[in-house]
Amino acid sequence: MGIEIRVARHAGFCFGVKRAVQMAFDAAAQRDERREKGSIYTLGPLIHNPQVVRKLEKMGIHPVDTVEGTQGGVLIVRSHGVPPQVLEEAVARGMEIIDATCPFVKKAQRKVAELAEEGFIVLIIGDRCHPEVQALLGYGKGKARFLEEVTPGEVFSRVGIVCQTTQSRESLNRGVVKVLETMGSVLEEIRVCNTICESTQVRQRECKTLAEFSDLVIVVGGKNSANTTRLAEISRSILGETYHIEGAEELDPRWFRGKKRIGVTAGASTPDWIIGEVVERIKLIGGNGEHGGEERDHSRGTELFL
């Protein structure tokens, strides 16, 4: 008897990531059509998926850590956004800017800037080292702080709270409670901005349900992807047998022994073709179908979940 594979309906690219990747493809195509020689850069990887980054490099789109050392060319601002100071420096170096910042991230950036302008201290909830959070801090122009770095003795009278778009609602709630517990007695005003992307919330809800109905869950996506890692954490909190992989080659047949119901989900920066390869590999392991050649429709021979 074969295994049953269920793929989360919203697994894979979200709107913002799909938009950023398409903008990069278009930039490379336009350069080739014009037979231009200028370089195309992204500040850091365009998205947190190593296979897509390698594909872009083959197209002549190269990630750089800083704009220092570059002169001219095109800079694609990745979906996570960058601090405004970085854009100013790139323009000063004569670079053409293609802004692929996710619209939901843009909304969070505007909220930080507005709150800072109105005199609030902006406390940001999220992963301190994530590029989106670094960009959000930049939009605070000295008035934004990472929540976890606020010391117990610090108190502010007017506080605004902004959340990294890929955080969970639980993280936002915990942050608000922390502020109220530490500063509630002196707070004159607190303004909470729910900047969590709806796409993130949908994926997280689906992941919870998928874990509840599965014997094993495979989460597909870059190990450096915050939203993919969070999906793995959510699934693992419900079902210990959860594995976070970047590609089909990481699948271990031993994981599937005695398992009948396999759940598959993927982060917002995981392309459909990688999900398809994972599903086809699981079918081979479970004896529930043959490899589909170049076919990459990950719903074929599986059930889309929710």
Image: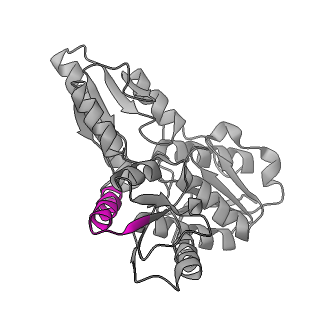
Image spot of residue 101 (x, y percent) = 32, 48
Vertical placement of residue 252 versus 25, above or below? below
**Could you say which is closer to the camera, residue 286 or residue 274?**
274
- Res. 245 image quadrant: top right
Image spot of residue 89 (x, y percent) = 29, 32
Residue farthest to the left, as pictured? 34
**Could you say which is closer to the camera, residue 240 or residue 86?**
86
**Left or right: 126, with 137 as reference point:** right
Image spot of residue 141 (x, y percent) = 34, 53
Vertical placement of residue 14 versus 214, above or below? above
Number of numbered callouts drawn: 0
**x 40%, y 55%: residue:** 14
- Which SS does the magenta portion mostly show? helix
**Left or right: 36, with 14 as reference point:** left
Inspect this view and state whether residue 56 appears: yes
Q: Is residue 119 magenta?
A: yes
**Could you say which is closer to the camera, residue 78 or residue 137?**
137
- Res. 173 image quadrant: bottom right
Vertical placement of residue 65 versus 145, above or below? above
Inspect this view and state whether residue 213 appears: no
Q: Give the range drawn in magenta.
A: 104-122
Image spot of residue 249 (x, y percent) = 67, 36
Residue farthest to the bottom, as pictured? 185
Vertical placement of residue 230 versus 198, above or below? above
**x 28%, y 38%: residue:** 87
Q: Quadrant of the N terminus?
A: bottom right
**Left or right: 266, with 94 as reference point:** right
Q: Is residue 144 magenta?
A: no
Image color mode:
one colour
**Left or right: 266, with 73 as reference point:** right
